[in-house]
Structure formats: structure tokens, C-alpha cells
Amino acid sequence: MTGPVVVVGDILLDRDVEGVVNRLCPDSPVPVLDESTAVDRPGGAGLAAVFAAAQGAEVALVTALADDAGGARLAELLAAVGVQVYALPLRGATCEKIRLHARGRVLLRHDRGGAAGAPGEPSEAVLRLLAAASAVLVSDYGRGVARQPALRAALAATRAPVVWDPHPRGPAAVPGVHLATPNESEVRELVKAAPGGSRLATASRGAQELRRRWRAGAVTVTLGGDGALLCHAGSTPLVVPAPASAEGDTCGAGDRFAATATIALSRGALVSEAVQAAVTEASGYVAAGGVAAALPAPVRAAAAPPSRPGGPRIGVAAAAEVVAGVRAAGGTVVATGGCFDLLHAGHVATLEAARQLGDCLVVCVNSDASVAGLKGPDRPVVPQGDRSRLLAALGCVDAVLVFDEPTPEAALTWLRPDVWVKGGDYAGGGPALPEAEVLRRWGGHTVVVPYLDGRSTTDMIAAARATGGTGGARTPDLRVGVDVDGTTIKGAR
């Protein structure tokens, strides 16, 4: 099959904080960590998706994203490495795992986010994605995505090979998966083994029981530095030793193993060949330094962002509050975006028309770095803080969100608006908006509204430099939005 590799599962936000310990706390005998660096990265199914994408595959991730800063950050990190995110709605907060390091060793892990909420229903685009996949990896972290009934039905029906990386708190694998990949401790929790017996005998009995219980084609038990044991249709298990023993940070080694096996199956490998490739890859991953060394450059360099000065209606928290309230009331979320350098009447007309199409309007604004990358080093004329405040002051704007990337894909993936609006002349059969494909992932729609002729920021800047003024223009009727497919959306709200 030629479709993408699809990863399905729970996503976490991992933050690695590195520092130096030189003293004890004066009010209790605990070390004080002086932070030097902090790096965010996708965890859980997100890390498996990053590893799969790093091996050259086209990767789509089906996961649940919360309406909070953690969800926005995850969407940003995944977009940076080319992972297409098909987000299910999620009530509650993003699960975060913060590891405090000193001299390469973990001192403490701090978890936050609370109990997981139930993910929402998958869109038709998600179900089509699973049907067309070249292989599927279910990366279950016990937070509910693998339990979603419609997803489970689609996973059972797909013709693609399915790899299931289980979690003791998660559900059973759907019947008929090609390969399940528990580790030793997971097998001991999933299958209560009798005391005694060798390590290999215990792993083999557990794997055979899981294979029977889940009606799986094969089950491989990962054994850390000793490789893996594979139980399949034959009565004799296959032991795949690690090419070399390596000590180091094993965080993410299971995700690397499962992602490698899934990529191999998508390319036509036998299960035994896929397991051998996965053992080799996971062993090399640990020997090379683990997750810190294995992450692709866009994620490895993704230091935790400094908090941006915001204000009323500005920032991730403001957007999350507005969107969550509208969704809870069953309303329509509308979003639009752009640079909005030198806010002018054309911008205002577009924003007013967009707001009439729903119950709230979130404006996605290119950051200063993003504008400079798109327009050149002499732009923007107005810095992002001022642009945001001017937009937030408009009565038709409910929230403003600043994004750093060239396109708003990451922001849209997190916001999941019902309608994405752009000003322009697309009604005459022109090309589809570039964001249209992203909106289809959750069943959203892209529309255009007419713009005011003669209003252009670039022309205004040129005219101001040359003459200090600009001309007027007529005002078109803005009560109608036009869908890029030709459908007219009438009736201003």
C-alpha cells in the first residue's frame, strides 16, 4: 500500500530541564537545581510519530488535543517535523511530564494535567485515513484514544498491517493485529505469571497468552539490552539479540522500536524482519544517547518558549477560553489569519464579514519573525505586540493568537475552527485556499469574503514612502461569504 504511516494514540508534552546542583535548599535537605536549558518535545504517541517521520515516511498522527497551551505547543512541535495531525477534541488539560536533569541524570519527574478526559469522535477524514494507510501504529499510553469505539472499529477494518504498542491501563488490542510489542513489565501486568521460571520462559508464556487473547498474528516482548523475543504461529519463539549491549537513557526506546517495526511492515518486510530491524534501531538509539540525541533538529532546538506579553483577548489562554465556551454552547468557531501590518479598512471589512459567519472570531497573526521571512527584512512595520493589541481592540475580534511559522497550520490544528476565512477573489474558480486540506482533517470548511479594492499594505507602505498618502476605494457588499467549492454561505449573523 502507498498511503501514509498512521500513528494512533495518546500524546503527552515532555519537557527536559537541564541544570546544575551546587547546594541544598536551606529549609529542607533537598538539592536545588539551577536551570540552564529547557526543551519541549512531543511524548507518547507524538514521539513515536516523530521517530517514524525521521525515517523518511509520510506520517499522520491521530490523537486528542486539549484546548490549552500544552496542546498548542504540541501542534507547533509536530508541524515543525512534518507530522500531519488529525486531532480529536479533548476535554481537560494536556498531560505534561517534566524531567529535571543534572549531569545527564534524571533527578525528578513532575507530572501534571490530571486524569484524562474522553476523546471526541473521529471525523470522516480520520476514518478514510485509516482505511488508506500503508501501516498503522497504535501507541497506547492509557489515556483513552485507543478505547474510542469508532477508532477501534476502523482499526479492526483496515487492510493495513497494525502494530499495537500496549499499556497496562489501556484496552486490549483489536483482534487481528499483525504485531503487538509489550515490554517485560507490561507482559507481567497483563498476564499474571506464576512465580519461578526463567526470564525467557516467562516472556514466552506471556506472549503466547496475549497472542491467543488478542488473536494477534505475533507478539514480541522487548527485553531491554537483551533484544526481543518473538512469538508467532510456530510453537518455538524467535529470540532476537541486541547487536551490542548499551547503557544509557532508555526513555523512548520502546517508541523507537515500535515505530521502526511499523515502518518496516509498511515497506513489505516480514514480521521477523521487522522485529530484527527494530531491535537494531532501538539498541543504536540507546547507545547514541537516547532521546536527546535522536530528535530531529527542529524539535531538538525547540527550547521552551518565553511567555509572550499578552493582554485581554491576546494569547493561547485567551483563545482557548473563547473557543471552549463557544464549543460548549454548540456554537460555530470562526478563524482567520494574516500579517495585519498597518491595519487598514480592507482588514476591518474582512474581519467584520468573518465574524458574521459564526459565534466567535479568533485571529491568527504572523509573528515578527514570520512576517520577515515572508515579506523581507524590512517588514513588519508594526511589531507583533502592537498589531495584536490593535486587532484585539476591534469589536468583531474575540481573541488573537500569534504564531511563528510561515503558515498557520499548527495554530489551526490546535484551534480546529469550524470555518477558516480569508479575504480575496476566489469566487471565480481560482485555486483552493492552501489551508483547505488542513481543515478537512476535522470536517471544517474554508471560505473567502470579498476584499476592498485598492487596500494593500505593501502599496500603502510604498505610497507613504513616496507621497505620504493613499487613495480611496469603493466598498463592496460584504454580507455574503463564498465557499471555495462554489457554495454560497448567506445570512449574516
Image: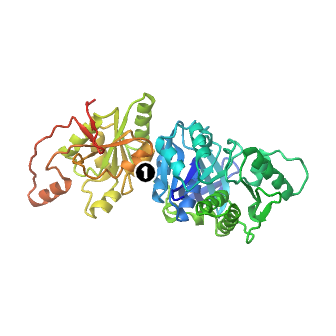
Left or right for 330, reference 6: left
Residue 13 in view: no
Q: Residue at x 29, y 36 (%)?
A: 355
Q: Nearer the viewer, residue 12 or 451?
A: 451
Left or right for 271, reference 303: right
Q: Residue at x 46, y 55 (%)?
A: 79
Give SS at disc 1: helix
Q: Which residue is mark 1?
A: 410
**Residue 219 image point, x, y percent:** 73, 54
Residue 260 found in image quarter: bottom right
Residue type at mark 1? Ala
Quadrant containing the C terminus is: top left
Residue 100 in view: yes
Q: Residue at x 52, y 37 (%)?
A: 121
> Among all residues in the image, which is located at the extreme right?
196
**Residue 217 image point, x, y percent:** 71, 53
